[in-house]
Image (tube, grey):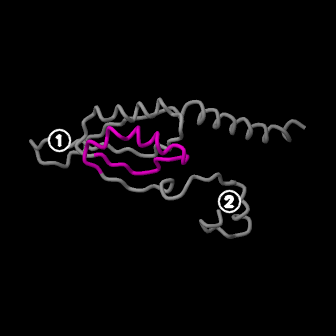
Amino acid sequence: MRPLYSVPLGIAATGAACLAYSVGYEVRSFRLRRVEVPVLPRGARPIRVLQVSDIHMVSGQGRKQRWLQSLAGLRPDLVVNTGDNLSDPEGVPATLDALGPLMDFPGVYVFGSNDYYGPARKNPARYLQAMRTGSHGMNNA
């Protein structure tokens, strides 16, 4: 009888651990990575490019807003925002406030899917059903 329950319990425990990690740590883990790319001629002044991506802002994320505002202190030469700034329409004012200090620097913006379409919950079972019926198109997932 034990093997009958061990697999589903193991799957449930793994899912619970992943959920706890994503809610408890990942959502509050902001990262700044520094990378040097030696493409300029020797002696040329370095160019500091700040890429901001996948903010997924919702209202009430004050800590995230303050962290994003602090990035202006890096004094970048160029800001590149590669989208997915929103995860909730109510997060628009918070996103504008958070990114406001970066507007003092030259920059470019590339839309992400969450910037075109409002995020929507998707049922992962629909993907499995599509695989079972043989319709693997992206629109069917």
Write the residue at 35% across / 53% down: 109
Residue 31 covered by magenta stretch:
no
Q: State whether residue 13 is above or below residue 40.
A: above
**Which residue does the image show at 61% across and 67% down from the upper left?**
139
Q: Check the image and report above or below for 69 versus 111.
A: above
Vertical side of 113 occupied by 14: above or below: above
Viewer-nearest residue: 18 or 27 = 27
Report the amino acid beneath label 2: Tyr
For marks 2 and 1, give the CA distance: 47 Å
Residue 7 in the image: state x and y as whole percent.
Answer: 78, 41
Residue extending furthest toward the left: 43
Instruction: Give the mark nearest the N terminus, 2 or 1.
Output: 1
10 Å neighbourhood of mark 2: few (<14), some, or many (≥20)?
some
* Residue position marked by numbered label 1 in the rendering: 46
| Residue type beneath disc 1 | Pro
Work out which quarter of the rendered image holds the N terminus and state it.
top right
Determine the secondary structure under disc 2: helix
Q: Residue at x 46, y 47 (%)?
A: 85
Measuring from the top left, give residue 15's x and y in whole percent.
69, 39
Is residue 40 found left or right of 106 in the rendered image?
left
* Residue shown at 25% from the left, 43% from the top: 105
| Residue range corresponding to the magenta coloring | 79-107
What residue sits right under mark 2 in the picture? 127
Foreground residue among 9 and 27 = 27
